[in-house]
Image (tube, grey):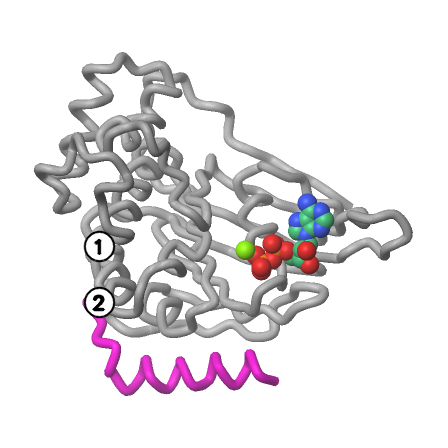
Amino acid sequence: MLTRTRAPAQAPSQVQTGLGSVCLRDVGKTFAARRRGAAPVTALDGLSLDAGPGEIVAVVGPSGCGKTTLLELVCGLTEPDAGSLQAAPATLMAQRDLLLPWRSAVDNAALALRVAGIERAAARTRAAALLRDFGLEGFERARPYEMSGGMRQRVAFARTLLSGRTVLCLDEPFASLDALTRQDMQDWLAGTLATQPRTVVLVTHDVEEAIVLADRVLVLAPRPGRVVATLDVDVERPRRRTDARLVALRERALRELRA
Ligand SMILES: Nc1ncnc2c1ncn2[C@@H]1O[C@H](COP(=O)(O)OP(=O)(O)O)[C@@H](O)[C@H]1O
Ligand SMILES: [Mg+2]
């Protein structure tokens, strides 16, 4: 059985900041074979996930276990072929930052507003304000190649926030960064979400990232992708990576992944 409901599309000039929720029940997704004669791929099977308003839910699992497919389903970019899915309007921040190389930071960030029909000067003003909040003052006119990986991710995140969707789907947002920058960006994201709460589905293969950031962590096993453990991260924020409770949860998640 397949049921699906979605909030209606918003009027172009209304950018929402409310908090939406996501509910998947026993969702399945199978892809037809890419080559003739090959077997179809069941990317997800019987997957359930709940993210309430303002919750951060992380999904960890090895490459190929269906994490990106899951986010594409939540964002309505593809349809499930089993189960039910209800999601407030969601936006995907893809694995690569996907900034337009010929556009400045402010114009890249403003893109979501421009697509929503907002006039250029107003879109730039709002985007520039957010870039300043994100510590990018002075880089408004920089092109992506003039910025570090962490700075580009912040621009991409600004663009994602400005989409005005109430649910953010982040696909391995920091996977391409070096270890130190990645930790800085995780702390930055935790701080940003503390001041500007959003409902977030965060996909990562980095167990520590999941535990440090999320309220709840789903551990996925591959082929077909399914939830093998759910860990509640009942630890107050701001969090320290060395907190014994976080370390214990990290070990548990790793054990579940290796099981
Ligand atoms: N459009 C597609 N057509 C065929 N197979 C696909 C398609 N998208 C993903 N898959 C397959 O589904 C599985 C899950 O992919 P994906 O969701 O990208 O995993 P992850 O993001 O966890 O690495 C993989 O085996 C992948 O090859
Ligand atoms: Mg992926």
In the displayed structure, does residue 75 sit left or right of residue 127? right
91, 175: nearer the viewer = 175
Q: Say which element carries label 2.
A: loop
In the displayed structure, does residue 130 sit left or right of residue 177? left
C-alpha gap between disc 2 and disc 1: 8 Å
Residue at image location 17% in from the left, 38% down from the top? 131
* Residue 237 numbered mark, or none: 2
Give the amino acid at mark 1.
Ala
240 versus 13 height, above or below: below
Rendered image quadrant of residue 109: top left
**Is 247 contained in the magenta span?**
yes
207, 23: nearer the viewer = 207
In the displayed structure, does residue 221 sit left or right of residue 233? right
Give the amino acid at mark 2.
Arg
Rendering coords of residue 79 (x, y %)? 67, 40
Q: Say which element carries label 1.
A: helix
Q: Residues within 10 Å of mark 1 (few under 14, many from 20)?
A: few
> Marks 2 and 1: CB-CB under 8 Å?
yes
Count the marks: 2
Magenta region? 237-259
Can residue 27 be seen in the rendering of this structure? no
Can residue 13 be seen in the rendering of this structure? yes
**Label 2 CB-ligand 2 distance < 8 A:** no
Q: Earlier in the sequence, mark 2 or mark 1?
A: 1
Rendering coords of residue 66 (x, y %)? 62, 58
Dominant secondary structure of the magenta stretch?
helix
Q: Which residue is mark 1?
A: 194
Residue at image location 25% in from the left, 77% down from the top? 241
